[in-house]
Amino acid sequence: MAAADLDVADSCFCTLLCCGEARATAAAVVDSSPWQTTIACPAECGITASGSFVDGGVQLACPEFDVACEAEDGEPRSCRVVFYTVDPQSVVPEQLPEARQFRDLRGQVTRPFAQALAECYYGAAEMDALHVQTMVPGQEAVGYYEVAIGEERSLFLHNSLLLLPNFLSHGDCHSLRAAADQRLAQPEAAKQVSRASDGYAACREGLDRLPVAELGPAAQAISDQILGRLLHFFESIPALAQQIFQRSEGLAKLRFTFASGEPAVNRYEAGGGFGPHTDKEMVTVNIVLSEPDAFSGGGTMFWPEGASVEELVLLRPQKGVAVLFHGQLKHAGRAVARGLRHLYVASFSLTGP
């Protein structure tokens, strides 16, 4: 089909948030649902291995793609894009000040063709879109944000995920990954890892679950810090802490009980996933430890509660982001297509001293 016969994508805008930096950008909607919108953004809004926006010639950690775009002279042109999922309320039709624009390879402002974007997203990109925090007009950015997954929702308690950006440092992510890989490389590890997974019928081939208790004192210290910080977070929202734990302060005085084999680092190879299940504890925390370009596929799928029609929500957060949800929420680990994905997971309840 000739370029003249193609429609350009409708213009829209949003403001992305990454490592404390807000970056306004032009965007094009590729797919949408009531709870998440998938957009294409200029590659100038790509994310690096450090988790920050690209600046200059630094290599991106999220995949970027060439797609066909409009050109005044009718010659074939392309522009480079990245795909993100964002809060639908953050996508607006009005031009934002200093918004980054789509540009062709000659540096000219352009707009990608809608069909080219769709073919790329559902084809070469394999529907892999990184979830990125955005600013909703009229709302202030705080230390956490909610991803709603159903029409009727209550913060954390019903159809609600809480995301804490930049929760775990890149150094700690690396340390947990390395500890898991080193443990698995030990000659006696295979049998012990298998025993640790005996209670998980939902596990697939390609997944190793490595309890943090077997990863050495450094990994255990990082896990303890994660859990301690989470208790402080819940105490910062007293009404929510009261609803979950029946008290709003002094949570550190209570005793942790964990799901079998947790806290753990889940190590997913190609084909590795985790079938639909509920954790049945008060709180589950998941933290991706791998770089975005270390794997394709993956992510966590969530089933909206009380929905008459099942419309799953797929979340692929950035490295180091803590994802919190309650233990009765049905979810599954989407299979990894290529590469290696590491995930810290802890499902826990608190009981009296």
Image (cartoon, rainbow, N blue to C red):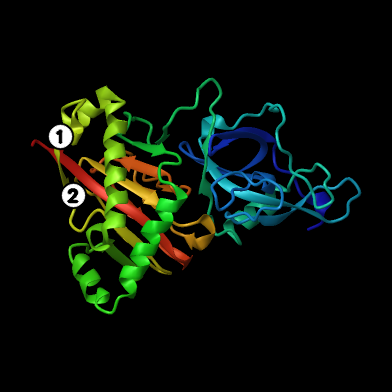
For residue 29, side relative to residue 338 (left or right): right
Outermost right residue? 73
Tell me: residue 342, above or below residue 257. below
State the mark number for residue 44: none
Tell me: residue 164, above or below residue 249. below
Whole-percent x and y of residue 205? 33, 71
Whole-percent x and y of residue 224? 26, 47
Corner quadrant of residue 9: top right
Which residue does the numbered mark 2 point to in the structure image?
258
Q: Residue at x 54, y 49 (%)?
A: 50
Outermost bottom residue? 187
Q: Quadrant of the image for the N terminus? A: bottom right
Whole-percent x and y of residue 297? 47, 60
Label 1 neighbour load within 10 Å: few <14, some 14-19, many 20+: few
Q: Quadrant of the image for the C terminus? A: top left
The three-letter code of the residue at mark 2 reads Phe
For residue 152, side relative to residue 121 (left or right): left
How far apart are the alpha carbons under marks 2 and 1? 16 Å
Outermost front residue? 217
The three-letter code of the residue at mark 1 reads Lys
Residue toward you, 127 or 287: 287
Q: Secondary structure at mark 1?
A: helix
Residue toward you, 338 or 196: 196
Q: Residue at x 42, y 61 (%)?
A: 341
Residue toward you, 241 or 119: 241
Instruction: State which mark lies toward you, 2 or 1.
Output: 1
Corner quadrant of residue 2: bottom right
Q: Residue at x 31, y 38 (%)?
A: 229
Which residue does the numbered mark 1 point to in the structure image?
253
